[in-house]
Image (cartoon, grey):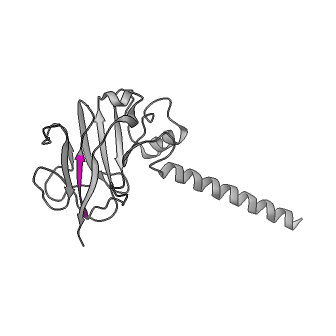
Amino acid sequence: MLKTVLTIFIVICIAVLGGGASVWYMLNAKESVGAVTVGRWTAFPEIGTPDADPYAKARIAREGVLALGRAEGLTFTAQRDTAGDALRRECSYTIEGPVPPARFWTIYAADANDAIIESRKLRPSALHSYQLLRKPDNSVVITAGTNPSPGNWLALSGEGRMSLVLTFYDTPIASSTGVSDIELPAIINAGCNG
């Protein structure tokens, strides 16, 4: 009798802890169900639509963010550079390459809690498409780091892991099925402090 009760208790504990851990993992995973990856950038095209998976809906409800609808835009997030190393705030990065057509787009660095990393250098914490210098082929080169750089500079501050968030507004890629066919800028590590 005691052996049966103990077995049932252990099975229930494993089920509750295993189920809770799997839900926690899925809600915190940046690359999960419904994700589309382009290079090191990941997006969830269905997240603001009725077709979103249950985990995406739960993530939106928990974080309290306003998801863009399919016709409104698309957000890409990168947590690793082109070499596969985690993005760190104490490092400098060159974000270089083409951007897909969009009426307007923004890029900013976010901390581990997905909050914008505020610049300590009296600089804007985000860059947008109307203020960027472009190359003749319409591609961009952005330097993200703690030290000032000529051209397009995204100021960073602090230490620890970060992610880059690239959001396209009013873009044809958000409503098309060919999201994975686009090309996004590469994220190249240009060196780290210390």
Residue 44 position by quadrant: top left
Left or right? Give the position of 76 relative to 12: left
Residue lying at 60% horizontally and 54% vertically, measured from the top left:
20
| Residue 17 seen in this snapshot | yes
Q: Which segment is the magenta one?
A: 91-96
Looking at this rendering, what residue extends furthest in the bottom direction? 194
| Residue 155 seen in this snapshot | no
Residue 109 drawn at (x, y percent): 28, 52
Left or right? Give the position of 141 relative to 159: left
Above or below, 149 relative to 165 = below
Tell me the quadrant of the picture where the C terminus can be found: bottom left
Residue 80 position by quadrant: bottom left
Residue lying at 64% horizontally and 58% vertically, measured from the top left:
17
Residue lying at 21% horizontally and 50% vertically, measured from the top left:
125
Q: Main secondary structure of the magenta part?
A: strand
Report the front residue among 136 and 129: 136
Report the front residue among 91 and 135: 135
Left or right? Give the position of 118 relative to 65: left
Residue 46 drawn at (x, y percent): 45, 33
Report the front residue among 79 and 180: 180
Residue lying at 29% horizontally and 36% vertically, measured from the top left:
168
